[in-house]
Amino acid sequence: MKFSAAEKRLVKKVAFRVFILISVIVMASYYMIYRYVEEREREIVLKSRYTFSVRIDSHGNVLEPVEEDAVNHTLADDFAQLTIAQIGDIWIHHFTSQYTQKYLSRTKKLEKVDIHETKILEKKTNTVFISFSAIVDEDNYENFIAWDGVVDNGKLICEWVVSFNIDNHYDGTATIYIKSIVTPEEYGITMYNESKKNSVAEKADVTGAEENENEMVFYRIKNAALTVTYNKGERFITVPVNVNDVLYENNSNDKLKYGSYCISTTKTAFLYGGKRNGTDRVPVTLVYTDDMGENWITSEIDTIYNVDYYYVEFFDEKTGIIFVGYDRNNLKESYKIYVTGDGGQNWNPIVDEKTGDIIKGVKFIDLSTGFLCYEYNDEMDSNFYRTTDGGRTFEKVILESQELDSTMLENNSNLTWFDVYREATVPTYSADRIITVYLIQGEQSEYNNGKTVAKYQSMDKGKTFKYIGQYERK
């Protein structure tokens, strides 16, 4: 059957109009679906760890929340059949369930939540250890930074020490919510995901690992020898350095000055010297290996002999930085900065001698960006400084103030945030590219008996810092 030219034009015209109509319907449907999903997402209210609560009956069944005035922060006899670990399980299950809802955006969503363990640490204070993991968007998970987890191949792994309040309503029900939450390290323990954390650290070439029998690589000073292991202590390799020439932490003879070494399977380096050993003068020197101790290379950095602090960091196999603090008195200290581009064999000073306050510590995250902390004194409004030009210049960082908890002020209601939180700690840089710094209280602080610290984090190399929360030191 043949169509005339007019019929063909008619068919094409009709087909085009049908195509346009279908396209409009599809676009309209897509828009309606998009708006529907967007509206559903706006309706979802995600509560933080401190604002999320669960109402249960004496058998642990979860009930609808209601407002109650009369509460008692005890686990009453009605709930004696429930352990605090079971209560912790109930809370963490329903807390994480918020983040698995259907219409959440990918940046706020958890998938495949797996609660590994809930373990009682202290019955009297309703304190438990909780470990869990979930799948997250590895490239955009800003909403979970405050959870203090480790992200490895798209899996968020969290370990929390949680203290609960159980508000008994004396009607066979109670509400459970968070009283405090800290990391195991902040609580004073090391728990079960250390191997995973170490694995992540090795991938990122994170340096400065303290000796820990749970770690795969670490150093040890024993029998007047500095040794290093790459297989959890099965074999120790001697580092060719005199232990009398290294710098130690205060009041220690077996802990190296933090930052004066870096250990990984691709680059291990130790700084030593910079002082007089008897009648001998030992210059600031770096000894390093690129093959896990099979061969060691020694590089002289500078002929300085009154060193009080030094720091080394390698960012890859070739580039690295050394910071040396020296000529310290009661008020001031000088420093120099050196860089290498050939793996550590040659070091060039990029900053001539500068003098500032007494150095507390240094952390660089690349050759350009780094942080310098001075020892705090009462004349400072901040002891925390940042550089973006490799240390040639440093700019003061003022972390944003917050409201103090009035219940902890007692008779000091006039105290402000910066009256309490004065001194910044040396920041850390995680495998997730998160910078963490704490503001700690002065010795005379009367806020919560001086036990709390304020935590801040940055995901943009320190351009901005986000307040995370207050944590109580045990």
Image (tube, grey):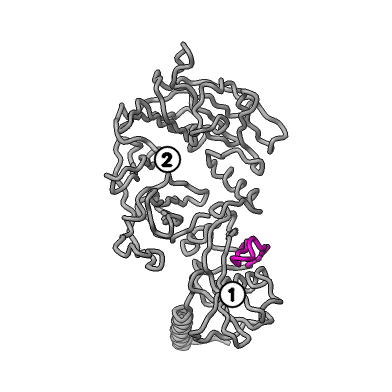
Image quarter in which the N terminus is found: bottom right
Residue at 66 percent across and 63 percent down: it is 120
Judge whether 260 appears above or below 388 on screen: above
Instruction: Find out whether residue 121 is within the magenta segment.
Output: yes
Q: Please tell me which of labels 2 and 1 falls first in the chain.
A: 1
Residue 131 in view in this figure: no
Assign a secondary structure to mark 1: loop
Viewer-closest of 341 and 364: 364
Q: Which residue is mark 1?
A: 74
Residue 237 in view in this figure: yes
Look at the magenta stretch and give its main secondary structure: strand
Please state the horizontal and vertical placement of residue 176, each as a whole percent of the image: 57, 75
Most distant residue in the front direction: 411
Q: Which mark is residue 364?
A: 2
Q: Crowdedness of circle 2 by 10 Å Cα count: few (<14), some, many (20+)?
A: many
Instruction: Find out whether residue 25 is within the magenta segment.
Output: no
Q: Is residue 65 left or right of residue 42?
A: right
Number of numbered discs visible in the structure rendering: 2
Please state the horizontal and vertical placement of residue 142, each as a whole percent of the image: 46, 61
Judge whether 112 appears above or below 306 on screen: below
**Mark 1: which amino acid?**
Thr
Q: Which mark is residue 411?
A: none
Viewer-closest of 200 and 189: 189
Please state the horizontal and vertical placement of residue 277, each as a whole percent of the image: 48, 16
Q: Is residue 432 left or right of residue 236?
A: left
Which residues, given as a range, are shown in magenta? 113-133
Q: Is residue 232 left or right of residue 182?
A: right
Assign a secondary structure to mark 2: strand
Viewer-closest of 122 and 432: 122
Residue at 47 percent across and 77 percent down: it is 45
Residue at 35 percent across and 28 percent down: it is 328
